[in-house]
C-alpha cells in the first residue's frame, strides 16, 4: 500500500474500551430498573454515536432519562477506564514504530479519547493528532470526521489508511475516499463491503501491509 498517513479509530481498535463501556451502561440501566444483557446491548452500541444509543434506549424503556443516563455514563467512565482499561494487543508497539503520519478519529468526546490514550500509554504518540466527532460535529458513518483527520495530518485522503472495527467507521472511510482496514470484523458485519476492505485479525498485521 502506498500510504502516507494512518487514521486510527480509538474504541475497540487502539483501546479495549467497548466491553467496559457496555458494562457501565448495563449497570446504569439496572439501577434504573431496566435489565438487558451484554449480548443485547452490544449490537446497539458498537461503533455508533452514544447519543443515538441513548435515544433508542429511552424510546424502548420510557423509565430512562436521556440526560441523566448520559451524565452518569460520562462521569463513571473515566473512573472505570483509569482502573481497568488496556490497549488492544500490539497497539503500542505498532504506533510507536510507525514512521509516517498518524492520528485518531473517534466518535467520542476529546476528554474521553485523551483519557483512553493516556491510561494505555498511547497519548504521547498522538499529541495534536486527535479528531473528535464532537469537534467537527459529524459522527461516523459521516465521512467528514475522516476528511478532517486527513487534513489534520496534511495528507491527501486517498493516501490515508483508516483502521476501523465497526461498520459505521468502515462506511465513513470508504465514503471519504480512504483505504480501509477492517480490524477483527467478520463477513457478516461487513456485509456488502467485504470486497472493498482489507481485513486483519491483529494490529501487528498492519505493519506488513504498510
Image: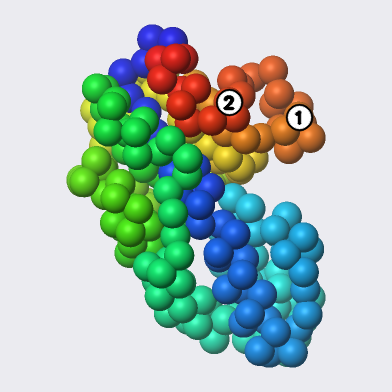
- C-alpha distance separating marks 1 and 2: 12 Å
Work out whether residue 31 can be spotted. yes
Give the residue pinned by disc 1: 187
Vertical order, 155 against 109 (above or below)? above
Q: Residue at x 33, y 59 (%)?
A: 119
Outermost residue on the top side: it is 2
Place of residue 106 in the rendered image (x, y in percent of width and height, measured from the top left): 44, 49
Q: Nearer the viewer, residue 75 or 52?
A: 75
Assign a secondary structure to mark 1. helix
Q: Residue at x 55, y 65 (%)?
A: 21
Q: Which quadrant of the rendered structure holds the C terminus?
A: top left
Assign a secondary structure to mark 2. strand
Place of residue 176 in the rendered image (x, y in percent of width and height, measured from the top left): 48, 30
Judge left or right: residue 117 versus residue 166. Answer: left
- Within 10 angstroms of label 2, few (less than 14), some, or many (20 or more) residues? some
Quarter-wise, where is residue 94 in the image? Answer: top left
Which of the two labelled residues, at mark 1 and mark 2, occupies the earlier sequence position?
1
Q: Count the marks.
A: 2
Q: Nearer the viewer, residue 24 or 73?
A: 24
- Within 10 angstroms of label 1, few (less than 14), some, or many (20 or more) residues? few
Q: Nearer the viewer, residue 57 or 137?
A: 57
Q: Residue at x 29, y 56 (%)?
A: 118
Residue 130, numbered circle: none
Q: Which quadrant of the rendered structure holds the N terminus?
A: top left
Judge left or right: residue 62 versus residue 118. Answer: right
Q: How is the image coloured?
A: rainbow
Vertical order, 39 against 68 (above or below)? above
Quarter-wise, where is residue 114 in the image? Answer: bottom left
Place of residue 180 in the rendered image (x, y in percent of width and height, measured from the top left): 52, 25
Q: Residue at x 54, y 86 (%)?
A: 68
Quarter-wise, where is residue 104 in the image? Answer: top left
Give the residue pinned by disc 2: 200
Amino acid at each position: 500500500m502506498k500510504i502516507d498517513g494512518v487514521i486510527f479509530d480509538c474504541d475497540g481498535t487502539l483501546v479495549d474500551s467497548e466491553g467496559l463501556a457496555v458494562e457501565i451502561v448495563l449497570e446504569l440501566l439496572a439501577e434504573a430498573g431496566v435489565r438487558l444483557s451484554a449480548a443485547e446491548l452490544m449490537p446497539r452500541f458498537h461503533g455508533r454515536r452514544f447519543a443515538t444509543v441513548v435515544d433508542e434506549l429511552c424510546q424502548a424503556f420510557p423509565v430512562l432519562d436521556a440526560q441523566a443516563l448520559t451524565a452518569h455514563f460520562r462521569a463513571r467512565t473515566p473512573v472505570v477506564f483509569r482502573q481497568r482499561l488496556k490497549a488492544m494487543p500490539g497497539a503500542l508497539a505498532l504506533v510507536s514504530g510507525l514512521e509516517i503520519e498518524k492520528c485518531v478519529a473517534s466518535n467520542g468526546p476529546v476528554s474521553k479519547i485523551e483519557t483512553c490514550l493516556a491510561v494505555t500509554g498511547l497519548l504521547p504518540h498522538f499529541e495534536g493528532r486527535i479528531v473528535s466527532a464532537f469537534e467537527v460535529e459529524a459522527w461516523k458513518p459521516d465521512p467528514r470526521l475522516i476528511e478532517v483527520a486527513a487534513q489534520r495530518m496534511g495528507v491527501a485522503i486517498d493516501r490515508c489508511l483508516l483502521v476501523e472495527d465497526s461498520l459505521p467507521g468502515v462506511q465513513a472511510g470508504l465514503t471519504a475516499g480512504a483505504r480501509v482496514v477492517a480490524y477483527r470484523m467478520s463477513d457478516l458485519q461487513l456485509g456488502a463491503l467485504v470486497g472493498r476492505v482489507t481485513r486483519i485479525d491483529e494490529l501487528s498485521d498492519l505493519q506488513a501491509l504498510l
